[in-house]
Amino acid sequence: QVTLVESGGGLVQAGGSLTLSCQAFGSLSTINTMAWYRHPPGKPRELVAGLPSSNVPDYGDSVKGRFTISRDNAKNTLSLQMNSLKPEDTGAYYCGAGTFSDYKKLEYWGQGTQVTVSL
C-alpha cells in the first residue's frame, strides 16, 4: 500500500511560480511511475507531467517549457516546479503513482492540492 500527500498549492498571480510536492509513504519499491494530473474546473482531468522508471519526463503540451517534474528517491518525494503560471493552469492537482509504466493505470492517488492563478 502507498499513501501520497500533496502540498504546495495556493493562490498566485499570472506569471508567478509555485512548487508542488508529493510525499510518498509505504511500499515504494513497487512503484515504477509517478505523475501529476490536474482537474481544471469544468474540464476533464489531464496529465500535467509524468516520470516513468526511465526518469525521462513527459509533459502535457500546455505546460511544456514552463513546468518541471522531478523525483527524489532518497526523500520519497515527487515535485512539480511551475513557472510562468497562467489562469488556465487553475485546478486541483493530484499526485499519482503506479506499478505499471502506463500513466493511465496509476493505482495510488493523493487527496489533491488546489492551484488558483489570478489575472
Image (cartoon, rainbow, N blue to C red):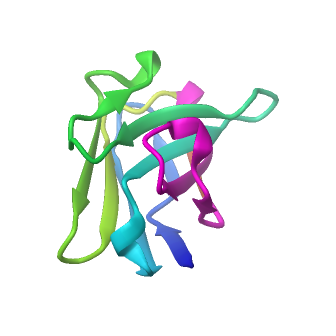
Query: Residue 83 location in percent, x, y?
Result: 30, 36
- Residue 96 lies in the magenta stretch: yes
Image: magenta residue range: 87-112
Q: Which residue is drawn at 58% across and 26% down?
A: 88
**Residue 98 relative to residue 68: left or right:** right
User: Where does the image place residue 99, in percent across and percent down from the top left?
Assistant: 47, 56
Q: Which residue lies furthest to the top in this view?
A: 61
Count of number-bearing discs: 0
Task: Give the left or right position of residue 107, taking residue 67 as reference.
Answer: right
Which residue is situated farthest in the bottom direction here? Answer: 26
With 22 as the anchor, is 11 left or right in this view?
right
Q: Which of 53 and 113 is in front in this view?
A: 53
46 or 86: nearer the viewer: 46
User: Residue 78's spot in the image, x, y percent?
Assistant: 34, 60
Q: Which residue sits at x=69%, y=34%?
A: 45
Let me know if residue 6 appears in the view: yes
Can you say which quadrant of the picture contains the C terminus? top right
User: Nearest the camera: 114 or 109?
Assistant: 109
Residue 54 on the magenta segment: no
Identify the image quadrant of residue 62.
top left
User: Where, quadrant-wise, is the N terminus in this rendering?
Assistant: bottom right
Q: Is residue 117 visible?
A: no
Q: Is residue 105 above or below residue 20?
A: above
Farthest residue toward the right? 42
Q: Give residue 53's position: percent from left, percent from top.
A: 27, 48
Q: Which residue is drawn at 41% across and 33% down?
A: 85
